Image (tube, grey):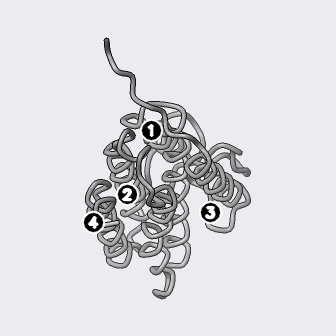
């Protein structure tokens, strides 16, 4: 497991998560308006709202470091460890909900991290591992640029949904299940050898 931790850069991913949790505690009450470009209602969010994106990008970098040819021969349960990293990275952010007044910010931030990491694990099964976090990052940015809907939440915009939103809950469950299933059941593709 030490090899897996070094290979995945687990310390960096967890350091990003802990750093963002500290920023949530320090700046989670500082609310700012984030202007929208594509219509919708301006997003009122804490300064640390984009902290989820930092952890998602760090996880994408971690997934891209995966040496598929070595893991095909590995007897260790590295796939379970990949799923466990998704959970471990969300825990420091989720722990911020115990601070007075940070329940909503902690829930949304940790939920967005898990959704982004789940989508990254899912995409890593079907596309280049180096680009696996791009769909989650793109959805995050588009979600912020479109803002909240007028009187309703768009079914696809998990980024700006509230902590108790059914949209956020559905994306959370779906991405955890799909990302975990793709990681645990999928056979790693052997790299092509040029002849």
The residues tagged by marks 4 and 3 sit, at their Cα atoms, a distance apart of 30 Å
Residue placed under numbered mark 2 in the picture: 55
The image shows residue 18 at horizontal and vertical percentages of 33, 72
Residue at (37% x, 57% y) in the render? 55
Labels 3 & 1 near each other (Cβ < 8 A): no
The N terminus: image quadrant: bottom left
Residue at (32% x, 76% y) in the render? 22
Residue placed under numbered mark 1 in the picture: 132
Residue placed under numbered mark 3 in the picture: 162
Q: Which of marks 4 and 3 is nearer the N terminus?
A: 4
Residue placed under numbered mark 4 in the picture: 11
Q: Residues within 10 Å of mark 3 (few under 14, many from 20)?
A: some
123 over 158 or under it: above or below: above
Q: Is mark 1 on a helix, strand or loop?
A: loop
45 over 131 or under it: above or below: below
The residues tagged by marks 3 and 1 sit, at their Cα atoms, a distance apart of 26 Å
Labels 3 & 2 near each other (Cβ < 8 A): no
Q: Residues within 10 Å of mark 2 (few under 14, many from 20)?
A: many
């Amino acid at each position: 497991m030490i090899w897996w931790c070094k290979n995945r850069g687990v310390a960096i991913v967890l350091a990003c998560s802990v750093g963002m949790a500290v920023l949530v505690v320090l700046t989670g009450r500082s609310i700012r308006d984030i202007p929208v470009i594509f219509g919708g209602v301006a997003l009122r969010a804490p300064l640390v709202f984009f902290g989820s994106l930092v952890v998602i990008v760090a996880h994408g970098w971690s997934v891209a470091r995966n040496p598929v040819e070595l893991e095909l021969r590995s007897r260790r349960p590295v796939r379970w460890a990949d799923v466990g990293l998704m959970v471990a990275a969300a825990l420091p952010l989720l722990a911020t909900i115990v601070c007075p007044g940070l329940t909503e910010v902690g829930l949304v931030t940790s939920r967005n991290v898990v959704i982004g990491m789940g989508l990254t694990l899912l995409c890593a099964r079907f596309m280049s591992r180096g680009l696996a976090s791009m769909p989650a990052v793109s959805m995050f940015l588009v979600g912020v640029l479109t803002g909240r809907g007028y009187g309703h939440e768009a079914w696809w915009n998990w980024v700006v949904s509230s902590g108790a939103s059914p949209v956020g809950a559905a994306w959370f469950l779906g991405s955890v299940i799909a990302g975990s299933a793709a990681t645990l059941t999928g056979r790693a593709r052997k790299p092509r050898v040029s002849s």
